[in-house]
Image: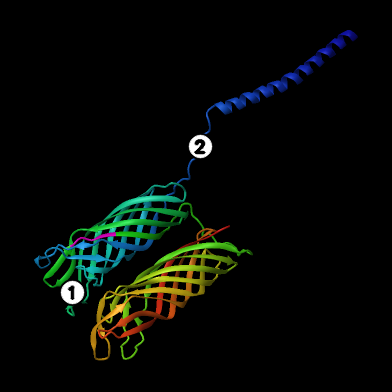
Amino acid sequence: MDVDNKYIGMNEMKKCIAVALVLPCSLMCHSLYAEEVHEHGPKAPPPLPPHFEPNGFYVTASAGTSYLEPQRSIADEFYNGVGIVTYDWGFNAGVSLGKQVGPWRFEVQMTYLYNDIDKVFDIKQGNYQEGVWYGFNVLRDFPLSKHWIPYAGFGLGGITMNNNFGDYSLKGTNDIEHNEPGSDSAFAYQATVGIAYQPIPEMRLLAEVRHIGSTQMTNWTRTSSDNLESYYEFTLFNLGMTYYFDGIPKHKPTPPPPPANQALFYMSLSGGANYLHDQISTPKDGVVGVKTTFDMGYNVGASLGVKYNNWRTELQFTYLSDEMDRVDDITQGDKVSGNWYGVNLLHDFPTGSAWIPYGGLGVGVIDMETRYNDSIYLMTSASTSEMVTMSNETDTAVAYQGIVGVGFQASESMRIFAEYRHLRAPEMKSSMLTTTEGYEYDLKTAYQNNLFNIGMSYTFGM
């Protein structure tokens, strides 16, 4: 009996030892097999790219600079078919209302166009052309990711242009050429290519190039029976912003980041239109002060700053250009252009939402060049007029500016803003006036410019 029990106990012990040896080995083999299958078997598919979400109805506002190609008029026999008009760079601003269906967009659009005339028949005189494009566009998005979306499209519609060549003196004479303002409309088309950045579902920032062309239309009416016809070809370089009324998914505005108890650096880019006040030079030695008026101009600039809580200090550079309209009521002249370099102190006023008004002051220097075209015919005294020479001048003066604006905090790092700036230099030299007798007079005037800008800033380290 004892022998049997001893034999049974030995068998049980052998079973336990076998289990203890076989089980780990089997588990190890299973693990190695699983790793081999995982390593050499079919791999899991890569993650899908971010899904592009269609976004219903939207509105877009855009603006920028425009290039109007030279026009060779289909002229009558009097001009032998060589009536050529060239233009300076101009500006445009527009709005569109559309509906997005998947990657397709359908929109109606209107754009205001403005270009100063550079030369008429190779004479650097003239006034301006302005008008409106209105049409229907079909666009196709090609999303690369959740945020970056190239697009392209085509549009059909019409264009209405108003021309104002004004009255100007012919080179080398004292004769004044009279021209009548005119207006005409024609069928037009446009092609568009661009790229959009979508920081949130409700908003896109865009940069695009548009080309607008027209069928034959009257671009100059010299008299009631002397019409010159041509074609319009515009190329527009624009920045803009799109807002979707029913973004998918619904997105609450990103609140501004809380005030940080540390200095944060940021960079801003901005641009827009500017309106330069009329300049009236100070009368001197019996010479009547020269009055110069201007068309709408443009400006572009950049800032590098640091912010602490709700205060911001920044270094700013801005290039400004304003085309002359009239010099002493005659459509002659060229432009005033130059640079502003300054330091700004700004304060933000948080509202508890993504909208942040702000205001500030700046001080610096302004370096401006005033350019005239050859000689001009103007009043040199209360009762005398003559052809005088207005020389080009460059002057640097101390200037200051006031700033008010509102920003939209699209994300913790990015802010979109619209602002108004008033830039003023109390006194600057605008020209050297030389009479036919050889007398020279320094003409000085105040410089006051109004800037209407949109821009974007990026804060580092957020």
The stretch of residues the image draws in magenta is 230-234
Q: Count all numbered tags in the image, as a single digit.
A: 2
The image position of residue 398, as x and y in percent, is 47, 78
**Which part of the image, by quadrant, shows the N terminus?**
top right
- Residue on which the image places disc 1: 180
Q: Residue at x 58, y 62 (%)?
A: 264
The image position of residue 211, as x and y in percent, is 29, 56
**Is 237 placed above or below 297 here?**
above
Magenta highlight on residue 113: no
Secondary structure type for disc 1: loop
Secondary structure type for disc 2: loop
Structural crowding at the residue carrying mark 2, measured as other residues with C-alpha within 10 Å and reported as few (<14), some (14–19) or many (≥20) = few
**Is 422 placed above or below 48 here?**
below
The residue type indicated by label 1 comes to Glu
**Mark number, residue 416:** none
Upstream in sequence: badge 1 or badge 2? 2
Residue 396 seen from this side: yes
Q: Nearer the viewer, residue 293 or 450?
A: 293
Q: Quadrant of residue 263?
A: bottom right
Q: Residue at x 14, y 68 (%)?
A: 227
Q: Residue at x 27, y 65 (%)?
A: 132
Alpha carbons under labels 1 and 2: distance apart? 68 Å
**Mark number, residue 46:** 2
Structural crowding at the residue carrying mark 1, measured as other residues with C-alpha within 10 Å and reported as few (<14), some (14–19) or many (≥20) = some
Looking at this view, name the residue that lies furthest to the front: 438
The residue type indicated by label 2 comes to Pro
Looking at this view, name the residue that lies furthest to the right: 2
**Which part of the image, by quadrant, shows the C terminus?**
bottom right
